[in-house]
Amino acid sequence: MGRKLLRIALLGCGTVGGGVYEFVRDRQDMVISYVLSRRPRPELSCKVVSDFSVILSDPEVDVVVEAIGGMDPAYEYVRSALEAGKHVITANKLLIAAHYRELVELADKHHVTLRCSAAVGGGIPWLANLERTLEQEPITRISGIMNGTTNYILDRMHCSDAAFEEALLEAQHLGYAEADPSSDLNGGDIRRKLVISANIAFGCVLREEDIAVFGIESLRAEDIQACKKLGRVCKMIASARNLDGCVAAYIEPAFMNSQLHEAAVPLNFNLISLTGEHIGKQSFYGQGAGRYPTAYNVLQDCVDVRNGLQGFYTNKLEDRPVDNSSVVRPYYVRTERVDEWLQKRVVKILDCGVILKPVSVTEMHAWAKEHPCFFASLRD
């Protein structure tokens, strides 16, 4: 006896939603029953509606795939779908990071599936592998490159000596960066991904605003030249460690040892790693964004629902503070405001900046908030 056909309501049919529509169209085990759209879509072969209540009230809809993005009305739609007993799949990192506890608890209460594999890593099977690892052993650390836009800019500046503004324009032209790229450049996009990843990996609930972040808006060509002079490669790195009673979690540029895997990640690719208590470090590499890579992960979530998977990646929701004071490393700093704190920690002077002796992440980020600068940690 065959399994029941999975009936999907697709909210939004743009870049990601359109990719999902194409993938499902070629399958025999699932079908798009509705597309929610503000405008007529005569090219689509399913029902197109502009009223979400039509979808919500249809008992035959098994899964709601949210591909609208943003907070409003996506939050109301996702919450209502869970309360109505429908499975929900989303690529919306803004929504999941902001309402993590509420949405996970709603899915548990109504015995439905909530998945967001495409919210972190695009097409990389990252969150699913966190879940698989947790079935066997604790995860002690996660880290890596979680944003294709910043990685593209850094890669172009290293490989072609492009200026920051030139590399950003290229990224926008190729569709890697939005017209307003601030969320990528200031690390906001990465912070949401790190919140979701750390929450799942460590069974906790972190507050987004507690995670220290320093972006690359102030990066200049002379910083890349200083990095090269040190024989290193500049990357934007997100890190989180599971500590006793707290979590160390932060995002910052890093001058990476050129022998590390992260240093070799090109263009808009991502590389995200987990460290297990016994298995050590495992890394996941692939396209971090784009129509088909992202739609692939959405579809994989649909397949998991089709195969009977229920719930979220974890049901552990422990409130944990963020404390980065125990993480200590040397830093490169370029600034025009040299104060006593900085002077006391300088161990080497470069053409345009200085190398500091090891200081804590907490100290470095606190100092940078009060001083116009660019900094990057030195990682081996």
Image (cartoon, helix red, strand yellow):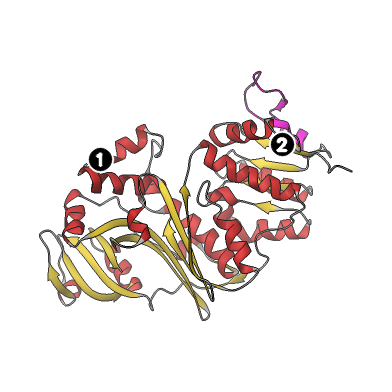
Label 1 amino acid? Glu
Horizontal arrangement in the rendering, residue 106 relative to residue 93 (left or right): right
Quarter containing the N terminus: top right
Q: Residue at x 35, y 38 (%)?
A: 171
Label 2 amino acid? Ala
Q: Residues within 10 Å of mark 1 (few under 14, many from 20)?
A: some
* Secondary element at image label 2: strand
Q: Nearer the viewer, residue 35 or 284?
A: 284
Instruction: Answer above or below: position of 132 versus 79.
Output: below
* Secondary element at image label 1: helix
Residue 215, given in percent of the width and then of the height, sits at: 33, 55
Q: Nearer the viewer, residue 340 or 231?
A: 231
Q: Residue at x 56, y 70 (%)?
A: 202
The answer to whether residue 138 is seen in the rendering is yes
The residue that mark 1 highlights is 165
Q: Residue at x 60, y 31 (%)?
A: 13
Quarter containing the C terminus: bottom left
Quadrant in the picture for residue 371: bottom left
Horizontal arrangement in the rendering, residue 110 relative to residue 133 (left or right): right
Q: Residue at x 60, y 66 (%)?
A: 133
Residue 186, given in percent of the width and then of the height, sits at: 36, 52
Horizontal arrangement in the rendering, residue 19 relative to residue 306 (left or right): left
Kindly identify which numbered label has been placed on residue 275.
none
Magenta segment: does it hold 98?
Answer: no
Instruction: Answer above or below: position of 312 versus 330.
Output: above
The residue that mark 2 highlights is 9
Task: Please state the extent of the stretch shown in magenta in the rendering.
Answer: 31-56
